[in-house]
Image (spheres, rainbow, N blue to C red):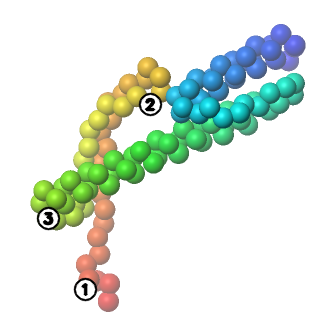
Amino acid sequence: MGRDSAGGASASLNKTISEIMTFLSDRGRRPGGRGVDLRDFLHEKLADLAEKRYRRGFRRGHMESHKRFVDTGVFPTEIDFEAEREFFDGQNRRVRLTSKIRTVTARAKR
């Protein structure tokens, strides 16, 4: 890879990292200097993004389960939820989520 190509790739990775950090409200330090592995740092930020989304989904599931329990007095074994979310800056998507839980009765546990 030529020097110009490497500089362009580095600039592209830096731009992507900046956008992800902005979306995550991450004001942490960035790697700098010549020869720094930006790809590893980018992967770390992508993992941060995935973790944030996972945590949000878990919380949403908990909220929906509680809401159904309060409404019906029965803990739901199936949850359906439809929402519109911004997965990345300007990337709004409508998502339908369904979760089914298999339960084991007290008699079957013995």
| Residue 89 % position (x, y) | 47, 23
**Camera-nearest residue between 32 and 81:** 32
Closest to the camera, between mark 2 and mark 3, is 3
The residue positioned farthest toward the bottom in the image shown: 110
Secondary structure category for the residue under label 1: helix
Q: Amino acid at mark 2?
A: Phe
Secondary structure category for the residue under label 2: loop
Q: Amino acid at mark 3?
A: Gly
Quadrant, the N terminus: top right
Q: Which residue is mark 1?
A: 107
Q: Residue at the location (62% across, 32% down)? A: 27
Vertical placement of 95 versus 54: above or below?
above
Q: Amino acid at mark 1?
A: Arg
- Marks 3 and 1: in contact by CB < 8 Å? no
The residue positioned farthest toward the left in the image shown: 72
Q: Which residue is mark 3?
A: 73
| Residue 101 % position (x, y) | 31, 62
Sequence-wise first label, 1 or 3: 3
Badge 2 density bin: few <14, some 14–19, many ≥20, Cα 10 Å: few
Question: Which image quarter: residue 39?
Answer: top right
- Marks 1 and 2: in contact by CB < 8 Å? no
Q: Which residue is mark 2?
A: 87
Quadrant, the C terminus: bottom left
Closest to the camera, between mark 2 and mark 1, is 2
Sequence-wise first label, 2 or 3: 3
| Residue 102 % position (x, y) | 30, 66
